[in-house]
C-alpha cells in the first residue's frame, strides 16, 4: 500500500508540474516570442488581462507544490499533494536520496520567495501590502530558469526512485495550442 500510494501521489504531483510547465511555455510563446505588436493590434486589453491572469495563476499553482504535507482544518487532517508529502513518503519507504533532498531544498527556497505574494496579494487581500505597493515574489529570470530545471529534475529523480522512470515535459506543443492561435492571427492580419 505504501509504495503504491507514493506512486499515485507522485503521478498527481508530476501532472501538476506538467501543467505548470505547459502554462509557462504558453505564456512565453504569447508574450515573449516577438508577437507583441500583433497582440496589441488584435486585442491589447484582452491580452493584457490574459497576461495578468496567467501571472497570478503561476504563483498560485507553484505555491501548491510548496504546501505542507498535511493541513488541519476543522479538526480533520488533509494531505496536500506537495513536495513535502512526496518527500515524507520517500523517507518512509527508504527511497529518499541526497539528489532528491538537494533539489527539494532548492525548490522550497524558490517557494519561500513567492509565497508572500500568494498570502498577501492573491489568496488574501492584505490591506497593508495593498497600500504599501511593495513588490512581493519578485525573482530574476535566472531564478525562474533554475526553478523550471529543478521541477524537471525533481520529477525525474523521484520517478526513477519509485520505479516510474523520468518523463521530459519541457516542451508542450500540440495541435490547437498557442502557436496555432498566433499562426491564425498572423495570417489574418497579413491578409487584412
Image (cartoon, grey):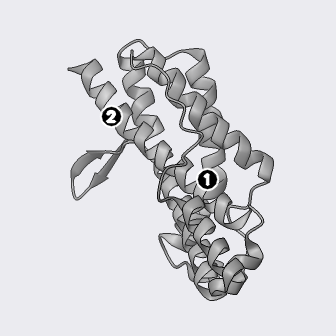
Residue labelled with disc 2: 9
Circle 2 packing at 10 Å, graded few (<14), some (14-19), many (20+), is some
Q: Classify mark 1: helix, strand or loop.
A: helix
Mark 1–mark 2 distance (CA, rounded to whole Å): 25 Å
Q: Residue at x 73, y 69 (%)?
A: 35
| Quarter the N terminus occupies | top left
Q: Residue at x 62, y 50 (%)?
A: 112
Q: Name the quadrant containing residue 192.
A: bottom right
Report the side of 183 relative to 4 (left or right): right
Percent across and percent down for residue 30 are 65, 65
Q: Is residue 18 above or below residue 61?
A: above
Q: Residue at x 57, y 24 (%)?
A: 101
Residue labelled with disc 1: 25
Q: Earlier in the sequence, mark 1 or mark 2?
A: 2
Q: Is residue 85 visible?
A: yes
Q: Residue at x 49, y 43 (%)?
A: 17
Amino acid at each position: 500500500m505504501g509504495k503504491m500510494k507514493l506512486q499515485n501521489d507522485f503521478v498527481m504531483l508530476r501532472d501538476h508540474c506538467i501543467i505548470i510547465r505547459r502554462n509557462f511555455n504558453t505564456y512565453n510563446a504569447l508574450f515573449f516570442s516577438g508577437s507583441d505588436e500583433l497582440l496589441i493590434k488584435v486585442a491589447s486589453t484582452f491580452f493584457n488581462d490574459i497576461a495578468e491572469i496567467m501571472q497570478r495563476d503561476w504563483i498560485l499553482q507553484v505555491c501548491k507544490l510548496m504546501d505542507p504535507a498535511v493541513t488541519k482544518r476543522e479538526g480533520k487532517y488533509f494531505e496536500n499533494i506537495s513536495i513535502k508529502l512526496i518527500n515524507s513518503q520517500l523517507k518512509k519507504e527508504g527511497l529518499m536520496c541526497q539528489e532528491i533532498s538537494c533539489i527539494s531544498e532548492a525548490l522550497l527556497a524558490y517557494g519561500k520567495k513567492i509565497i508572500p505574494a500568494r498570502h498577501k496579494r492573491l489568496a488574501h487581500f492584505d490591506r497593508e501590502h495593498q497600500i504599501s505597493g511593495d513588490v512581493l515574489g519578485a525573482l530574476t529570470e535566472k531564478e525562474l530558469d533554475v526553478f523550471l530545471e529543478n521541477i524537471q529534475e525533481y520529477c525525474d529523480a523521484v520517478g526513477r526512485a519509485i520505479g516510474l522512470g523520468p518523463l521530459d515535459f519541457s516542451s508542450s506543443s500540440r495541435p490547437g495550442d498557442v502557436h496555432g492561435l498566433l499562426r491564425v492571427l498572423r495570417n489574418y492580419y497579413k491578409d487584412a
